[in-house]
Image: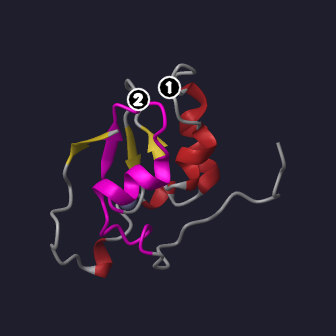
Amino acid sequence: AEDMEYRLRTGEVVDDSTYPMAPHMRSEEARLQTLSSWPSTAPVRPRDLAQAGLFYLGESDRVQCFCCGGMLGGWEAGDTPWAEHTKHFPYCFFILGHDVGNIPLQGGTVE
Ligand SMILES: [Zn+2]
């Protein structure tokens, strides 16, 4: 995958108060809902995208992180959302494991 647009610059200090970028997408369930129209031909799964903090922008295969606002697209076979997120936006507070208000999917459904 490639980052579509840099919202964060490497090494830039970010104020805690600006996080998360999209508070209404803190919930993994809300993120999954945006992915209901995710193209079935894309090589990454909605569940994995949502778990990596990403939600669908409804256009092509572009997704955005609820926390850092980083955008990713151009998914290729073998990509994993978490790894691409980490690679392109290594200073994302969600990626770094900070408490940014993420709400994991409840229920623990096994597929
Ligand atoms: Zn992020």
Question: Does residue 26 lie above or below 73 as drawn?
Answer: below
| Magenta part, dominant SS | loop
- Answer yes or no: do the residues labelled 2 and 1 have beta carbons within 8 Å? yes
Q: Is residue 36 above or below residue 64?
A: above
Q: Residue at x 84, y 49 (%)?
A: 110
Q: x and y percent of residue 34 in the render?
A: 54, 37
Using residue 45 as the reference point, say whether residue 66 is left or right of it. left
Q: What residue span does the magenta drawing correspond to?
A: 68-96
Image quadrant holding the C terminus, namely top right
- Residue 21 lies in magenta, yes or no? no
Identify the residue at image location x=38%, y=26%: 59
- Residue that badge 2 annotates: 61
The image quadrant that residue 45 belongs to is top right
Residue 94 among those drawn in magenta:
yes
Is residue 47 placed above or below 65 in the rendered structure?
A: above
The x and y percentages for residue 6 are 19, 51
- Left or right of residue 104: residue 42: left
The residue wearing badge 1 is 42
Whole-angstrom CA distance, mark 2 to mark 1, is: 7 Å
Q: Secondary structure at mark 2?
A: loop
Residue type, mark 1 in image: Ala
Res. 69 in view: no
Ligand 1 falls in which quarter?
Answer: bottom left
